[in-house]
Amino acid sequence: MQKSKVTKTPDKAEEKNAETEKRIPKCPQLLRGMKDILPESQKHWNYVRKIVEELAEDYTYERIDTPILEETSLFARSVGENTDIVEKEMFSFEDKGGKKVSLRPENTAGIARAYIEHGMLDRPQPVRFFYWGPFFRYDRPQAGRYRQFNQFGFEAIGDSNPIIDAQLIVMCQSLYQTIGIPVVTQINSVGCRECRREYEQLLTDYLSSRKKFLCEDCKRRLTKNTLRILDCKEKDCKEILADAPHIVDHLDEECKAHFVKVLEYLDEADITYQLNPFLVRGLDYYTKTTFEIWPEKEEGSQSALGGGGRYDDLVEVLGGRPTPACGFAGGIERLIISMREKEIVIPPPEPPDVFVAQLGESAKKKALRLVEDLRQKGIRAASNFSTEGLKYQLSVAAKLKVRFSLILGQKEMLDKTILLRDMEGGSQEVVDYNKVYDELKKRMEKVKAIIKNGNNHSEE
Ligand code: AMP
């Protein structure tokens, strides 16, 4: 017997929805691994940026902005053809002129390019840069790992002295401490090209005899990029690595002396660090010092807040004259996640100096002008013109924590006056409209003096 097919007739609402969907396609969704930074999160971002900028200023690192899009070959030559970043993670495409370009996965290469392109070798060395901006890696998204993420960073180009490495580490630790995140520096040395070549051979020999125990990824790395095996998180690989030779035991005299000096300087500066023989970082350009900043008591480089090291060959590899350099990049999203976990309270921004409230159409017009006049004279004036009610406007002023409000109503318009209200206590005075700036300034100065003298103005 043939089964009768029951087809449901769509009701009117369903038909209408389907029709609307046909006419107005669904809003495109956020791409995987991308994030909106909403206004409510901006206070964290602004705070971190302020701390980074202040630190950069203290240590005389100057801001540099390089393009987000660069020639693909820049990253292939610097980060390395056989690294995960270049092999698998770059957003690369041909532009309309047929040039192979990539969204930057990191910034050291771009800055080294800019250093060469603008002839910065002629400036007093080292040239110190800091940056802040978005980077792109087509990685598997997970907590704290995005496809578009933001980094700040510091680069000191043109000085081979180990004190540069040490000072950079001191500076980075200080940044996290200022924000309230306890951190520990993981440090290693990968030596120069020659030491690394010899060590790589030693490691390859050691691992080749144990190849069958390695994970599939590491088997592949064994022929392409052996050092990356040191980073592997697989249990079996880690067990094999426990007895692997350490690069620090195979450094030449110069690289060893450099590393010892960096550690001596760190000891002198009371920096907590841990020697980590597996820390090779995933980029080819590193030489000598490599380091990462980890949150205290965390294991595994996945949780690194940032990392960096020396890259003495990079400028030369890109076509410049031999120029030693050292740098650090910190992940901003990961730092903000740590701040949230630690419930770090962000100091509130300074409130505006005054709130301008108005009642009635003509007062509103005059207030619009007054806000701008005050602002031009250096007084930070806030307002809320979208409502008429004085009570509501004053509640906005209270929320903003302003000390003074100026109130302009019908009566004041006629008398050419304005009400000056002290929001602490609520006392109000009528002042001549033409003298509003002087009167306000006088009271602001008085409050400032009281605060400076450490008195509590509410006791006056
Ligand atoms: P790296 O030079 O790759 O070690 O990156 C430096 C820092 O940037 C890391 O320690 C992270 O804090 C951050 N970072 C790197 N890749 C990502 C990503 N895909 N998503 C979020 N943060 C990242």
Image: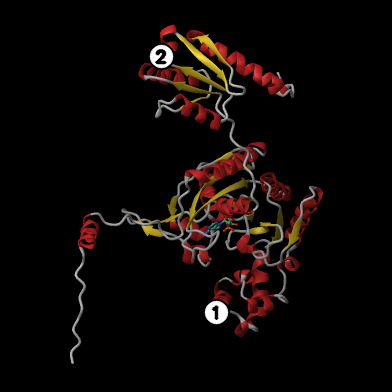
What colour scheme does the image use?
A: secondary structure
Query: At 49% across and 13% down in the image, what residue appears?
Result: 418
Residue at 64% x, 44% y: name it.
Answer: 345
Q: Secondary structure at mark 2?
A: helix
- Front in this rendered view, residue 190 or 395: 395
Q: Residues within 10 Å of mark 2 (few under 14, many from 20)?
A: some
Name the foreground residue: 122 vs 371.
Answer: 371
Residue 51 position by quadrant = top right
Q: Answer yes or no: disc 2 within 8 Å of ligand 1.
A: no
Residue 229 vs 54, above or below: the answer is: below
Task: Indicate the position of residue 92 as horizontal and vertical percent values.
Answer: 41, 59
Compared to residue 138, the image places residue 446 above or below, namely: above
Residue 329 seen: no
Picture quadrant where residue 337 is located: bottom right
Quarter of the image where ligand 1 sits: bottom right
Is there a contact, CB below 8 Å, between mark 1 and mark 2?
no
Q: Which mark is residue 285?
A: none
Q: Position of residue 285 (x, y in %)?
A: 59, 59
- Identify the mark at residue 216; answer none if there is no mark: 1
Residue displayed at 69% across by 22% down: 457
Residue furthest out toward the bottom? 1
* Viewer-nearest residue: 175 or 45: 45
Viewport quadrant of the N terminus: bottom left
Relative side of 289 to 390, left or right? right
Q: What amino acid type is highlighted by mark number 2?
A: Gln
**In this figure, which residue is indicated by the disc labeled 2?**
410
Q: Image point 40% across, 58% down: which residue?
A: 31
| Label 1 crowd (10 A; few <14 / some 14-19 / many >=20) | few
Discs 1/2, front:
2
